[in-house]
Image: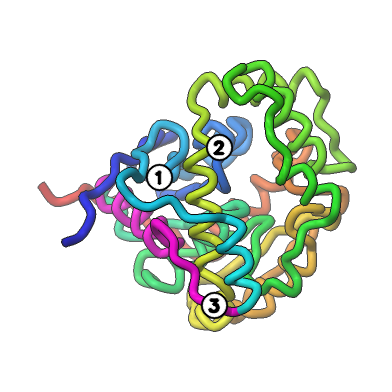
């Protein structure tokens, strides 16, 4: 018996009759973590922009009633090439995206994913080629462990915890430290601005159990290079030159394994979305979508 569909919280920006760009966010992040300036720039270029909360994040449905996996055991099993049992997979998360597209009547869309969202977008393009007009994978990976290991500082930040997980201010400080550790050294975000953004997200939703399950989905999906080689959608891979969390080598590996993929390396960029880079990112994404056709929204049946 299959699981019932989850509620997926979404936001649609721009004219619904315009070609759609669907944005898929990363690990534990929310639809509000897609910068408003990026979304509005894409709308200004003539696109409808759909951003949403993945399952187990933000205001979307929680996956409950399933045995919680052990991250350390999962990582050890993955390192040994053994199967990893997970509550769900990247393919399930890609299915959520397709379900949302169905709900919105989008037969095809340009799909843009960041970090874990890039992995989900890659799986979506491989499994549902008829639904993906173009693919943009940002600061993501093919699952090849040899090129995807985070740097020492980033690893330490990821393994840390808030001093007081029940205190919102403590959580905000912890997350600000983590974002600073993995962020863009060439485009640093002022601490107060960072705290403001994170505070907005924490007040909207904070769900560490969901982050753990999403991470398990990533680990359990393993090396996806063979799957990437089946992707037919025109693909743009964007990666920061100094990403401390998912190294540039992972971006190069992703582009190498997707037929015909174009790689854009941005100097000074780490693993975040600094405001100073939004015009460049918006232009790169919109130009890629422009080059590879349009797909008007079609009303859903019924």
Q: Secondary structure at mark 3?
A: loop
Query: Which circle's residue, 1 or 3, is located before the other in the chain?
Result: 1
Q: Residue at x 49, y 23 (%)?
A: 204
Dominant secondary structure of the residues highlighted in magenta in the image: helix
- Distance from disc 2 to disc 3, alpha carbons, whole Å, reads 40 Å
Neighbourhood count class around disc 1 (C-alpha, 10 Å): few under 14, some 14–19, many 20 upward? many
Magenta span has 85? Answer: yes
Can you give x and y, in whole percent of width and height, for residue 62 in the image? Answer: 36, 40
Cβ–Cβ under 8 Å for marks 2 and 3: no
Of badges 2 and 1, the one in the foreground is 1
Of badges 1 and 3, the one in the foreground is 3
Magenta residue span: 81-104
Q: Which mark is residue 39?
A: 2
Which is nearer the eye, 148 or 66?
66
Q: Residue at x 29, y 45 (%)?
A: 6
Neighbourhood count class around disc 2 (C-alpha, 10 Å): few under 14, some 14–19, many 20 upward? many
- Give the left or right position of residue 147, taking residue 16 as reference: right
Q: Can residue 295 be seen by looking at this rendering?
A: yes
Which is nearer the eye, 123 or 234?
123
- Give the left or right position of residue 144, taking residue 46 as reference: right
Residue 274 image-quadrant placement: top right
What residue is shown with label 1?
55
Q: The N terminus appears in which quarter of the rendering? A: bottom left
Q: Can residue 279 be seen by looking at this rendering?
A: no
What residue is shown with label 3?
82
Which is nearer the eye, 139 or 210?
210
Query: Which residue is farthest left?
Result: 302
Query: Which circle's residue, 2 or 3, is located before the other in the chain?
Result: 2
Of badges 2 and 3, the one in the foreground is 3
């Amino acid at each position: 018996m299959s699981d019932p569909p989850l509620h997926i919280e979404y936001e649609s920006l721009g004219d619904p009759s315009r070609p759609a760009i669907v944005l898929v966010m990363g690990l534990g992040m929310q639809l509000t973590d897609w910068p408003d300036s990026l979304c509005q720039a894409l709308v200004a270029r003539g696109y409808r922009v759909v951003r949403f909360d993945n399952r187990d994040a933000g205001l979307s449905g929680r996956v409950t009633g399933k045995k919680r996996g052990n991250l350390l055991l999962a990582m050890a099993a993955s390192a040994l090439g053994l199967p990893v049992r997970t509550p769900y997979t990247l393919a399930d998360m890609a299915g959520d995206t397709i379900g949302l597209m169905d709900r919105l009547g989008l037969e095809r869309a340009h799909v843009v994913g960041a970090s874990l969202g890039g992995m989900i977008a890659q799986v979506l393009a491989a499994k549902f080629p008829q639904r993906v007009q173009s693919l943009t994978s940002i600061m993501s990976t093919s699952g090849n462990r040899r090129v995807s290991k985070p740097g020492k500082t980033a690893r330490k930040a990821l393994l840390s915890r808030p001093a007081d997980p029940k205190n919102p201010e403590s959580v905000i400080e912890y997350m600000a430290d983590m974002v600073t550790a993995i962020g863009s050294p060439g485009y640093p975000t002022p601490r107060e601005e960072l705290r403001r953004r994170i505070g907005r997200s924490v007040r909207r939703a904070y769900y560490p159990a969901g982050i753990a399950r999403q991470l398990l989905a990533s680990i359990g999906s393993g090396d996806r290079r063979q799957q990437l080689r089946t992707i037919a959608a025109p693909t743009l891979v964007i990666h920061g030159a100094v990403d401390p969390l998912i190294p540039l080598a992972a971006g190069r590996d992703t582009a190498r394994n997707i037929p015909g993929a174009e790689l854009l390396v941005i100097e000074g960029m780490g693993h975040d979305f600094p405001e100073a880079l939004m015009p460049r990112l918006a232009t790169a994404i919109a130009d890629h979508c422009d080059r590879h056709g349009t797909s008007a929204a079609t009303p859903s049946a019924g």
